[in-house]
Image: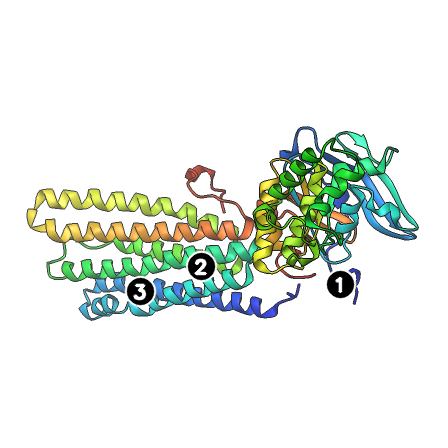
Amino acid sequence: MTTADRALPSLAGLAARPQSPAATNGAPKIESIGLNFYYGHTQALRDISVRLTPNVVTAFIGPSGCGKSTFLRTLNRMNDIIPGARVEGQVLIDGADIYAGGDVVELRRRVGMVFQKSNPFPKSIFENVAYGLRINKMTSSASELTGRVEESLKQAALWTEVKDRLHSSALALSGGQQQRLCIARALAVRPDILLMDEPASALDPIATQRIEELVYDLKKDYTIVIVTHNMQQAARVSDYTAFFWLGKLVEFDRTEKLFTAPAEQLTEDYVTGRFG
Amino acid sequence: MDRVVPHFQEELEALQSRLLEMGGLAEERVRACIDALESRDLGVVAQVMGGDEPINQLHIEIDNRCFRLLALYQPMATDLRAIVSAVKINTDLERVGDLAVNIAEAAQRYTTHPPVKKLIDIPTMGTIAQTMLRDALDAYVRRDTALAHAVLNADDQLDALKTQVFRDLLTYMIKDPVTVEPALDLILISRHLERIGDHATNIAEDVIFMVSAQDVRHHPPATHERA
């Protein structure tokens, strides 16, 4: 039985609801307006309109195939590389539509991404972090480069663990350390926004706690969007949570509200384990 | 809708069942001690005074169940509210059990004196307190916020009767100092019954929170909607 076959409440009427809580007043960092996304003939996102506030953590939750990762990937045009993929609607970052043209490489510098599986380059720890700085020619001297690498590793809470072996292979690090290295690599090019697609799902509980603590610390400098299957993790790390189902944004609200008193029955059913 | 984890539902139902059992015991003990006061039946008084153990055992068991559910399942939304409410209702019911013992102790002392007067208001208070307690528990079982609001509104009657009892007995004490000691016990009993009403009110507030996520505590009575 597919999710669509289950006897669930209708989605009718959801589109008419305001999809951003009042607390997100002010200029949003990210705003999607009437966003539809298609993989060929399959529509994966349906009329997503949402405003994400600067310097907060927003979590996307929902069952597999609900569109949360697809939506995350529309925010830095990572879906562009998929054959047959098509976008309708707008994604505004600082008020500018990222699908109206512009430099995709520059966009992805501003909107960094961390994936489920850590993917360090087969290079040294130092070179992993320095890579983006080098190819973007973002530093003018070796000392500046070294300083930026150190700063990024400190921001990613990895510096004290690797400072004495910066030129060892990144592949020798533990899974949790590799993931923090990938975060350091993303931070090195000084993005505004950090997208995280299940960044702790392959990690042990202690490494997961470190990532969660890191997310909490980073939000003062970055706008963070995190996709997670772990609802407790979403509840712990995020300020706002969006619940997706069948490509629709069902509910978006303060995390505390969404997990204690959701407005939508579908959200209630999902967070209390009645479907998924 | 079925849950992905059915045994969590079973655990929640077992928790509710044990809480109701405790509520039934507490309600019965309030009824027994008011009956004993009226009939001056020292045997029943002694039973109430010595019979608090089953409620105390349930108090511990229900707390343990709640801790276990919170730790193992990290519940959300209505489930979270239901368990947090159960923790609080559990404490209220245990206090009702203690107050029944306090009433029985005062009743035991009272029966060593001649009656001060025919008891009218105190049995009425007992009936109202029991009804409030029963309605609060019914509201819990049926997830009935209208009934819970009715419990909140009933509390005013108990408060007024407690004041009435005090004024009434004061006149007896002024007239005849011999009545001071037994009259003070009746005043204490009226105070305990009023506290039982307060605990029923707490339970009703928890029911409203559990069902609708509305926190109605510490609101003036006028803001409670009429049932």
User: Residue A272 at x, y = what percent?
Assistant: 61, 58
Q: Indicate the quadrant where residue A26 lies.
A: top right
User: Amino acid type of disc 2?
Assistant: Leu
Q: Nearer the viewer, residue B163 or B73?
A: B73
- Secondary structure beneath dot 3 equals helix
User: Residue A41 at x, y = what percent?
Assistant: 92, 53
* Quadrant of the snapshot with the N terminus of chain B: bottom right
- Reading the image, the residue beneath label 1 is A6
User: Amino acid type of disc 1?
Assistant: Arg
Relative to A54, A48 lies left or right: right
- Reading the image, the residue beneath label 2 is B137
Subunit ID for the residue under disc 1: A
Q: Nearer the viewer, residue A73 or A249?
A: A73
N-terminal-most mark, 3 or 2: 3
- Secondary structure beneath dot 1 equals loop
Residue at the spot 59% in from the left edge and 56% down from the top edge? A207
Relative to A225, B52 lies left or right: left
- Reading the image, the residue beneath label 3 is B29
Of marks 3 and 1, the one in the foreground: 1
Against A43, residue A108 (above or below) is above
Give the Cα distance between marks 3 and 1.
48 Å
Subunit ID for the residue under disc 3: B
Callout 2: few (<14), some (14-19), or many (20+) C-alpha neighbours within 10 Å? Answer: many
Callout 1: few (<14), some (14-19), or many (20+) C-alpha neighbours within 10 Å? Answer: few
Subunit ID for the residue under disc 2: B
Q: Which of B134 and A186 is in front in this view?
A: A186
Against B132, residue A193 (above or below) is above
User: Residue A193 at x, y = what percent?
Assistant: 71, 38
